[in-house]
Image (cartoon, rainbow, N blue to C red):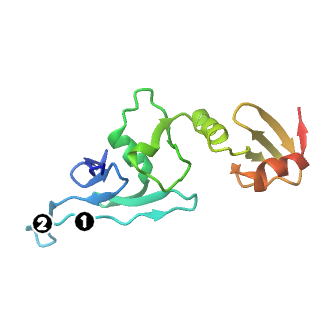
Amino acid sequence: MELTEIWKQVVGFEGFYEVSNFGNVRSVDRYVKHPRGSMMLRKGKPMKQSKNKHGYMDIRLGKNGIEKAYLVHRLVAMAFIENNENKPQVNHKDGVKDNNKLENIEWATRSENRYHSYRELKADCWLRHVKGRIFFITNGTQTKRMVGDFVTPFGWKIGRHNGYYGALKAKVIQ
């Protein structure tokens, strides 16, 4: 059974942009003021998304002369999924950051998002740099402070290459 693409207004950009349950974004037909004072019809069109440095798809939206980048998965979640518990993050259920289809995303807390990564996606651990040579490592259930030369000071890292195996070589402080 083929799903139908459903379009809803982008929250905060009603009358300017729409987002679909497939993760697509388009501008809508609207009348804008021409520099000479008359009104002209600006036809809506599909908008191009780009992958940001973290692997998520984002898109630039503008209104009233102000343009800003927005994460597509957040636009889909805000338009289609109720967030009664005010959860701050959007989780990709399959772990694929550019799969922004409605059935692949859900609202989550930071803890739920990390736990999902650890339990469902089999990520070994995360490293978080605090300052200097202070690092914390967590596996979703336990957190320990670490010091050592085998961890990198670039924020949270997920995966075996610099997480679990690098943490084994570093000294863990209880």
Residue 154 visible to the viewer: yes
Residue 133 visible to the viewer: no
Q: Residue at x 39, y 61 (%)?
A: 60
Could you tell whether 39 is left or right of 60 in the image? left
> Mark 1 or mark 2, which is nearer to you?
1
Q: Amino acid at mark 1?
A: Lys
Residue 16 image offset from top left, x and y in percent? 24, 55
Residue 39 image offset from top left, x and y in percent? 9, 65
Occupied quadrant, residue 150: bottom right
- Relative depth, front residue between 106 and 37: 106
Residue 46 image offset from top left, x and y in percent? 29, 64
- Relative depth, front residue between 102 and 52: 102
Tell me, for residue 45, which label it has, or none. Answer: 1
Question: How many numbered callouts?
Answer: 2
Could you tell whether 34 is left or right of 24 in the image? left
Q: Residues within 10 Å of mark 1 (few under 14, many from 20)?
A: few
Q: Residues within 10 Å of mark 2 (few under 14, many from 20)?
A: few
Give the answer, above or below, for where 84 lies relative to 22.
above
Q: Residue furthest left?
A: 38
Tell me, for residue 21, which label it has, or none. Answer: none
Q: Residue furthest bottom?
A: 36
Could you tell whether 66 is left or right of 132 in the image? left
Occupied quadrant, residue 142: top right
Which residue has dot 2 on it?
A: 41
Q: Residue furthest top?
A: 85
Q: Residue at x 39, y 45 (%)?
A: 102
